[in-house]
Image (spheres, helix red, strand yellow):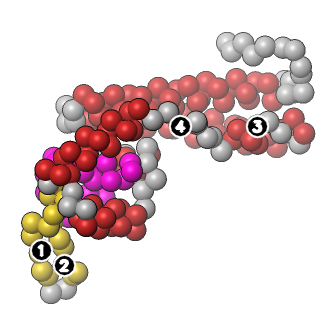
Amino acid sequence: MPMKLAILGLLLERDMHPYEITLVMKERSMDRVIKMQTGSLYYAVDKLAEGGHIEAVEVIHSPDRPDKTIYRITDKGKAFMEQLILQQIRKSDPMYHPVHIALSLTHLIDQEKVENLLEERIREAEHEVNFAYQLYEEHIAVVPRSVLHLMYGRYEHCQTELKWLKCLYEDVVARRLNDIGRPIIPD
């Protein structure tokens, strides 16, 4: 559903062909908040068209390229988009993080290997924090405030992740992962 929602929202801004939708999604870093694959975008566009939520307004023919179909959102699509927005806001899925299951077992393996990997993860997380803030700042004058909230929220999440990784790293360096009965109190 997030893919369909993104497509409908972008088509509400202006008529576009699927490849253009992909470019706008990447420009706004939507690929960081939803799983985005070109095939799934085209599939979602087809399903939205079949459901009457979007419609073709123009087909651009080119002798040396495939035809480009320009789509627009319909009234039915606008109502569907509102329904999807409310569903997504209401949704409260558990957070699955790739490190969670591994973290619960890291005390059982070579701590030096964990330490080295965490150093790398911390560098990546620092980059993500900087990137998220830069993205937010670059879009302040360009996108609606609702989108800024998304971007700023991503920045806040990245900062929290970085802080958590640094706290974990300190425990690994101090070889405290086997400790029991000590609360985690970050600096």
Quadrant containing the C terminus in the rendered view: top right
- Measure the C-alpha gap from mark 3 to mark 4: 21 Å
Q: Which residue is mark 3?
A: 103
Mark 3 and mark 4 lie on one chain; the one further toward the N terminus is: 4
- SS of the residue at dot 3? helix
Q: Nearer the viewer, mark 3 or mark 1?
A: 1
Q: Nearer the viewer, mark 4 or mark 1?
A: 4
Mark 4 and mark 2 lie on one chain; the one further toward the N terminus is: 2
- SS of the residue at dot 4? loop
Q: Which residue is mark 2?
A: 67
The residue shown at (87%, 35%) is 107
Q: Which mark is residue 59?
A: 1
Q: Nearer the viewer, mark 3 or mark 4?
A: 4
Please name the amino acid that badge 2 sits on. Asp
Mark 3 and mark 2 lie on one chain; the one further toward the N terminus is: 2
Q: Position of residue 33 (x, y in %)?
A: 43, 44
How many numbered badges does the structure rendering display?
4
Mark 1 and mark 2 lie on one chain; the one further toward the N terminus is: 1
User: Is 170 situated above or below 45?
Assistant: above
Task: Decide: few, some or many residues near mark 4? Use Cα within 10 Å; few <14, some 14-19, many ≥20.
Answer: few
- SS of the residue at dot 1? strand
The residue shown at (61%, 41%) is 96
Are the residues tagged 1 and 2 within 8 Å (C-beta)?
Answer: yes
Q: Position of residue 36 (x, y in %)?
A: 42, 56
Mark 4 and mark 1 lie on one chain; the one further toward the N terminus is: 1
Mark 3 and mark 1 lie on one chain; the one further toward the N terminus is: 1
Q: Which residues are magenta?
A: 1-22
